[in-house]
Image (cartoon, rainbow, N blue to C red):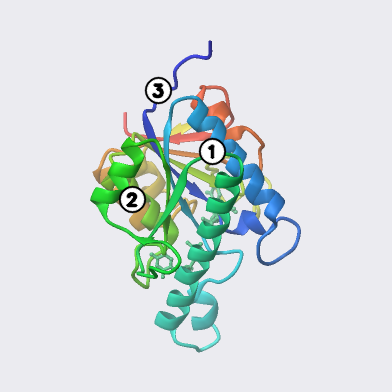
Amino acid sequence: MPAQPPYRRVLLKASGEALMGEQGFGIDVSVVDRIASDIAEARSLGVEVGVVIGGGNIFRGVAVASKGGDRVTGDHMGMLATVINSLALRTSLIKIGVDAVVLSAIAMPELCESFSQRQATQYMDAGKVVIFAGGTGNPFFTTDSAAALRAAEIGADALFKGTQVDGVYTADPKKDPTATRYEHLSHLEVLQKGLAIMDTAAIALARENNIPIIVYSIHEKGGFGDILKGEGRCTIVADA
Ligand SMILES: Nc1ncnc2c1ncn2[C@@H]1O[C@H](COP(=O)(O)OP(=O)(O)OP(=O)(O)O)[C@@H](O)[C@H]1O
Ligand SMILES: O=c1ccn([C@@H]2O[C@H](COP(=O)(O)O)[C@@H](O)[C@H]2O)c(=O)[nH]1
């Protein structure tokens, strides 16, 4: 009998960029299926899971702004990208028998339900995986901030950031090969040291609401479940 994870309810922020696999753009269904199976494992451990997926595999608003385009329209396009990814994940979850629902911050009733905190918590209490699409619904934010916001709203015990790297490093490990990984650090240390693993708004919101952030590699099959069981490789960001 596996040990009961210390978390009852978590919010998983899944990297959008990871979904493109080796393709360089868009959705590699085999990657989405694998992330769905990791979520299924978490559910089988008795953990309630909410999910926010990024949109970096399809579109980021800053890409438009950097070429002189309209940032707000670019951000709207980025939020739509997160809806596409969310629908893909829902499909993969349902395919393997995991009850899942998409709630979008931007109303699009033909595709999915609209977000409300009340509906989200009701679905989570009922054991559904709730996928929060459309980010915060506002431009100038990211899905990291949306993840911290939804984590606070659903009363999550932890925010899991499944990303391209296996933790928080002294510098971006993709740019600095001498960077070393932290095992633990506080929210304040992440902010003070300017560690760019998540945007500062997300870290600050998690800190204010006393939500630990666990950073791990989403590329590691079974990595989510391993950490829930206290076994995986990650960095834990939490105040003492
Ligand atoms: N101090 C740091 N420690 C670890 N990673 C860092 C650090 N500074 C920058 N990074 C970079 O941050 C990246 C994660 O950023 P980001 O949230 O944009 O990616 P993502 O998880 O793929 O999200 P998205 O959903 O937007 O695609 C890592 O891949 C890493 O290269
Ligand atoms: O609350 C939000 C969340 C996201 N956006 C836009 O979507 C893209 C994709 O999200 P990532 O977090 O970068 O994966 C983001 O770059 C923004 O353009 C937003 O406007 N508001």
Against 160, residue 83 (above or below) is below
Nearer the camera: disc 1 or disc 3? 1
Front-lying residue, 170 or 116: 116
Would residue 52 be seen by someone viewing this image from the given angle?
A: yes
Q: Which residue is mark 1?
A: 39
Q: Is residue 74 above or below residue 124?
A: below
Q: If you read the primary sequence from the N terminus, does the residue marked by circle 3 or circle 2 appear first?
A: 3
Cβ of mark 2 under 8 Å from ligand 2: the answer is no
Q: Please provide percent x and percent y for residue 235.
A: 50, 35
Count of numbered marks: 3
Q: What is the C-alpha distance between the residues marked 1 and 3? A: 16 Å
145 sits to left or right of 182: left
What is the spatial separation of the Cα atoms under label 3 and label 2, in whole angstroms? 20 Å
Residue type, numbered disc 2: Arg
Q: In front here: 77 or 1?
A: 1
Q: Label 1 sits on what residue type?
A: Ile
Numbered disc 3: secondary structure? loop
Residue 4 picture quarter:
top left
Q: Which mark is residue 6?
A: 3
- Quarter where residue 5 is shown: top left
**Distance between mark 1 and mark 2 Cα atoms:** 17 Å
**Label 1 near ligand 1 (CB < 8 Å):** no
In percent of width and height, residue 100 lies at: 47, 46
Name the residue tied to disc 2. 150
The disc, 1 or 3, on the residue closer to the chain's N-terminal end is 3
Tell us which disc is closer to us: 1 or 2: 1
Q: Residue at x 55, y 35 (%)?
A: 40
